[in-house]
Image (cartoon, rainbow, N blue to C red):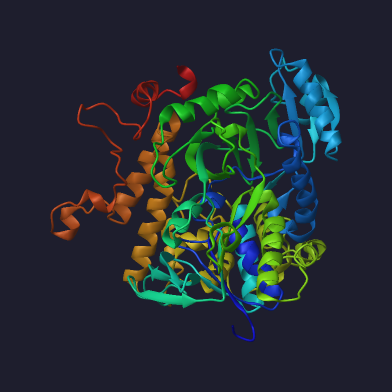
Amino acid sequence: MTETPSVLVIGGGSTGCGIVRDLAMRGMDATLVEKGNLTHGTTGRMHGLLHSGGRYAVSDQASAKECIEENRVLREIASHCVEMTGGLFVQRPEDSDDYFQQKLDGCRECGIPAEVLSAEEAREMEPYLAKDIKRAIRVPDGAVDPFRLCVANAASAEQHGARIETHAEVVDVLVEDGEVVGVEVKHDSGPGTRTHKQPGTTEKIYADYVVNATGAWAGQLGEMAGVDVEVRPSKGVMTIMNTRQVDTVVNRCRPKGDADIIVPHETTCILGTTDEEVEDPEDYPEEGWEVDLMIDTLSELVPMLKDARTIRSFWGVRPLYEPPGTGTEDPTDITREFFLLDHDERDDLPGMTSIVGGKLTTYRMMAEQISDHVCEKLGVDAECRTADVPLPGSEDFTVLRDYMDEFGLRSPIGRRSAQRLGSRTDEVLKTDGPNPVVCECEAVTRAEIRDAIEGSGSDLNAVRIRTRASMGNCQGAFCCQRMANELAPEYDEAVAREAYHELYQERWKGERHALWGRQLSQAMLKYALHATTMNQDGDPAETGADVDFGAFDSGTDVAGDESGTTAVADGGSKSDERDASTGGTRADK
């Protein structure tokens, strides 16, 4: 073993980023590898809720207590990633009075501040709640930006000497003499990215200890090492609306069920979710009826959702873990607690531990416990400091008032930038040259884009998760090419075009499930803009070659299907096809 023990963390979600930060702050030689961008897996596909613990106060009080504890910690150390919106558990006339009381009692038993509001008081907070609601319980829920949170953890880890490798997929776990000694990774980053690894290059990374923090993929990683990790992946759909129909997290006050939460997130609202077990965390159906369910059911709480425009939908996979012998059939019954699996004690395979289960709100607590475990394994005596040391951007959030006064940031654009950058506002926005807006929907300026490029290279999807550029109402229709333009003159045209194409395709991927009514018109406008101005449809008049629609297509026809009817998306419902073909809104059904 080296004088400074080395630890390899696999997985760039919230838990992995939290672990590598914790280990680096304890003086360890830490490396993180992630097969995509940071947040590539479950973390980047969650509804953005900072749990108060109220959702688990009846069914899983251990998880509820962890949530409220970490809720308070994250407000302090990650203030530039958190919006304390507050939350409501809303009771409709058909919902159980007994369950309402159980929820209230459970919150108080778990130390979660809870206050009963009358229907009138609840509608005073949220005017668009249904007129026939009975009452509500107010709890300290919030909204958290998972992208900003992970990037900040990774940045902090790097400041303490860690190595962060994205686009580095583990293709083998290295086992020598019955012990895990490292992994082999395949780099998939092209020229111009921060790692400067050629696509297809493989590398063996050795370490004194390996941590499997791959979430829903933990079982697959375990198989590479020859051990079983009993993860039960459970998919859930989230649907993003065009505006914030509510400014408070709105939960349905009833036992477990689908479509029971609305989370205000930045400029939008996210509707969630379903809970359906799947075999493969990367290969499962994404169906139109799931999106319909979100809107139809949650309209019972907020009726105006029926008339709102849906801008995209996405699916995430929960890394649920069921200890052997439990035998739970319903994934909603599986605990949301997290589990540390020492493969030496459990499988007689030293050198590796897996962390499974849990949720984003408790990521730091999970990271602390596994870092304690690693330190014990390696004989390192170092205390955790992650609950006390703010993340980059949250060191002194109060200074924002001074920045806003000095630099005229009272405008909506300046305010949004300052909210994203936190205590880095001065460092990023105080530039000598012009600083125009690149993304109007999210009010992202050139200075922010260039700062993100400096940190992530030419990967515009990495720039996106750092800035929110292209994540607003137009889904990149008017800013994708502007973002690509900011890569010049540092990167050549071929790199910029490829980065633009990858960003545009990623945005299109989520829009395929929202093509009806006004959103269909928006999508067709976007298609026309990029097909004509950027030749994304491969027009033979411009290229002199046969059309390759695969250069634009993501597996779904936009303009029409073989029968000549207007297509919605793969998995779209027939009722949506009718809406699309008539130009009516979804509420016209």
Observer able to see residue 412: yes
Nearer to me, 360 or 302: 360
Image quarter of residue 351: bottom right
For this view, does 29 lie left or right of residue 135? Answer: left
Image quarter of residue 160: bottom right
Q: Is residue 292 above or below residue 79?
A: above
Where is residue 66? Give x, y as percent.
76, 47
Residue at 47% across / 70% down in the picture?
178
For this view, does 116 lie left or right of residue 393? Answer: right
Observer able to see residue 491: no
Where is residue 424? Give x, y as percent.
70, 68
Image quarter of residue 92: top right
Residue at 84% across / 25% down in the picture?
117
Nearer to me, 87 or 545: 87
For this view, does 262 lie left or right of residue 481? Answer: right
Nearer to me, 567 or 230: 230
Residue at 73% across / 16% down in the picture?
96
**Quadrant, the N terminus:** bottom right
Where is residue 478? Give x, y as percent.
45, 52
For the image, the number of numbered tags is: 0
Nearer to me, 366 or 432: 366
Name the outermost residue toward the bottom.
Answer: 3
Where is residue 563? Give x, y as percent.
20, 26
